[in-house]
Image (cartoon, rainbow, N blue to C red):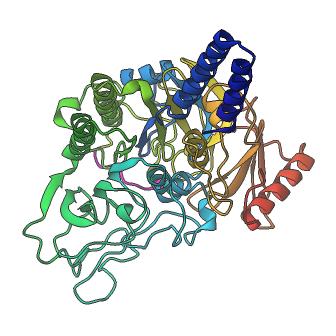
């Protein structure tokens, strides 16, 4: 019994002693009503969480972010109309592994052992031993956790000879996986970092697909293969253009099975498709369906499957108490696409990027933003970020508050009442008030990084890019006036640049971000 209950009983005893029995009954009923109300509030169920994380999708691909987009994205546009869209959300790195690390740990990737760039084949986990991850946090809070698609945060693969896997540290090797022991479980992967259920690959260039921590299949990739691997007769080859459909079916099966079993605890579903990353493995039924070429067809296909997951939540009656988050791990690698541009054999290389032009028949995946994947420009590091939670997040709202992927952990931690330890998620800000539409400048600045380790700082209207050496000049842009970063104004604003450079160095050299 709480103190309020004991106090109420004492008052009732006093009233009864005074002959006020009716007053006592009224007072008791009032306290019982308040007590029951408090219990109901305390027992309000935690929301389910669905996190949809696209791969190399641009800021300008969605119609809700770019009215000039040539790609129909009705499902994601509907999601935006039913929730909040952030227009200043950051990855904060323009390539895959580090952005996923920021999302999963709430920590800048330059604090990990992998200071820059993406993980190569078979490299170990980017997470330190004991480091808190998003699925671990939710699992500790009582969530069932499931992930489908792409991990790319490292894992340790067993080998037949005890040596490092063939192809270790490379992106392409003729003898890829030649000594992998396909009968033994991997370690340090998704299931060792918080996922109870996992189906997907660690790194696409490794090809291997895990069910839990067991290798069960391989991605039929256009660029990579497992021809040299031994003992692979039981390994299923999943064609790349069927992989999106497969992980969608498994995600829907997870949701449906929980509903069938009437599970009462909340769930966390991490849906991480390998789309629209190259190769553009579009399913036959979607080829030629947009005016944006093969790339646009792939984005449209992704939107269709996202729609299937959202419709499943509706049909199962789970949408009302489910937070849906959508983002991309970095900008698109393409600055321009179209039906007249052949991207069938597009490589994953910055040197092949063709700058956008004035052709109205071309689609610009990163919208009006400068640059692409790999670069420190806004086109590389800014991401669409959409959140929906019926009855809690306002509908059809756009927010210009700075939001970083590393803020997801602290934000969801606040919503699910998890006390994040001070030495964990050290670069993660609780943005729950902005998610709920309260509009507050929670994050004053965010560090951004390119694949070749250029470092920058976004703060308010300013974007500062540090020089790579002492002899070079840095860059400064006013993003309110010059969103496409076309006019470097560092010379006339050297004092601003110097202050931002000092702040940037402080964050990088420090052990935590100032909050």
Residue in view at x 53 percent, y 53 percent: 99
Residue 277 placement, left or right of 251: right
In this rendering, the answer to whether 274 lies above or below 403 is below
Residue 31 placement, left or right of 146: right
The percent coordinates of residue 253 (x first, y second) are: 22, 40
In the foreground, 355 or 284: 284
The percent coordinates of residue 418 (x first, y second) are: 58, 48
Q: Is residue 350 magenta?
A: yes
In which quadrant is the N terminus drawn? Answer: top right
Q: Is residue 278 visible?
A: yes
In the foreground, 35 or 451: 35
Residue in view at x 65 percent, y 13 percent: 21
The percent coordinates of residue 288 (x first, y second) are: 24, 28
The percent coordinates of residue 409 (x first, y second) are: 56, 48
User: How many callouts does the rendering have?
Assistant: 0
Residue in view at x 64 percent, y 51 percent: 428
Q: Is residue 367 visible?
A: no
The overriding secondary structure of the stretch rendered in magenta is loop
In the foreground, 487 or 31: 31
Which residues, given as a range, are shown in magenta?
Answer: 344-351
In the foreground, 309 or 261: 261
Q: Is residue 495 magenta?
A: no
- Outermost residue to the top: 22
Q: Quadrant of residue 216?
A: bottom left
Residue 492 placement, left or right of 213: right
- Outermost residue to the left: 233
């Amino acid at each position: 019994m709480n103190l309020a209950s004991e106090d109420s009983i004492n008052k009732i005893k006093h009233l009864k002693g005074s002959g006020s029995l009716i007053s006592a009954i009224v007072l008791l009923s009032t306290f019982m009503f308040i007590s029951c109300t408090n219990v109901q509030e305390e027992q309000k169920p935690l929301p389910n969480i669905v996190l949809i994380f696209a791969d190399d999708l641009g800021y300008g691909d969605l119609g809700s972010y770019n009215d000039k987009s040539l790609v129909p994205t009705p499902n994601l546009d509907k999601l935006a109309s039913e929730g909040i869209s952030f227009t200043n959300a950051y990855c904060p790195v323009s390539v895959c592994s580090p952005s996923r690390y920021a999302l999963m740990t709430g920590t800048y990737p330059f604090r990990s052992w992998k200071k820059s760039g993406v993980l190569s084949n078979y490299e170990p986990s980017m997470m330190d031993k004991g480091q808190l991850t998003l699925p671990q946090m939710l699992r500790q809070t009582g969530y069932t956790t499931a992930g489908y698609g792409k991990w790319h945060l490292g894992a340790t693969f067993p080998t037949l000879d005890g040596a490092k896997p063939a192809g270790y540290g490379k992106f392409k090797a003729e003898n890829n996986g030649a000594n992998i022991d396909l009968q033994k479980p991997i370690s340090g992967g998704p299931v060792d970092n918080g996922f109870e259920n996992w189906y997907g690959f660690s790194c696409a260039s490794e090809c291997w697909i895990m069910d839990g921590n067991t290798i069960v299949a391989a991605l039929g990739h256009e660029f990579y293969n497992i021809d040299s691997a031994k003992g692979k007769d039981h390994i299923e080859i999943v064609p790349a253009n069927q992989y999106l459909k497969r992980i969608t079916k498994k995600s829907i099966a997870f949701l449906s099975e929980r509903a069938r079993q009437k599970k009462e605890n909340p769930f966390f579903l991490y849906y991480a498709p390998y789309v629209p990353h190259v190769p553009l493995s579009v399913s036959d039924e979607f080829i030629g369906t947009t005016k944006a070429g093969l790339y646009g067809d792939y984005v449209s296909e992704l939107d269709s499957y996202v729609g299937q997951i959202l419709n499943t939540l509706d049909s199962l009656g789970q949408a009302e108490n489910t937070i849906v988050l959508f983002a991309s791990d970095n900008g698109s690698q393409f600055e321009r696409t179209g039906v007249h541009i052949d991207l069938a054999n597009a490589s994953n290389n910055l040197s092949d990027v063709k700058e956008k032009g004035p052709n109205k028949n071309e689609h610009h995946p990163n919208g009006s933003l400068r640059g692409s994947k790999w670069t420190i420009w806004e086109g590389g590091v800014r991401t669409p970020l959409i959140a929906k939670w019926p009855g809690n997040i306002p509908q059809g709202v756009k927010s210009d508050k700075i939001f970083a992927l590393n803020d997801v952990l602290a934000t969801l931690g606040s919503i699910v009442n998890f006390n994040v330890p001070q030495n964990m998620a050290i670069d993660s800000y609780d943005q729950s008030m902005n998610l709920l539409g309260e509009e507050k400048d929670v994050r004053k600045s965010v560090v951004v990084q390119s694949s070749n380790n250029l470092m920058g700082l976004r703060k308010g209207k300013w974007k500062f890019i540090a020089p790579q050496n002492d002899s070079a000049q840095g860059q400064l842009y006013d993003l309110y006036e010059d969103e496409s970063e076309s006019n470097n104004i560092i010379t006339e604003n050297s004092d601003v640049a110097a202050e931002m450079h000092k702040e940037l160095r402080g964050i990088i050299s420090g052990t935590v971000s100032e909050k």
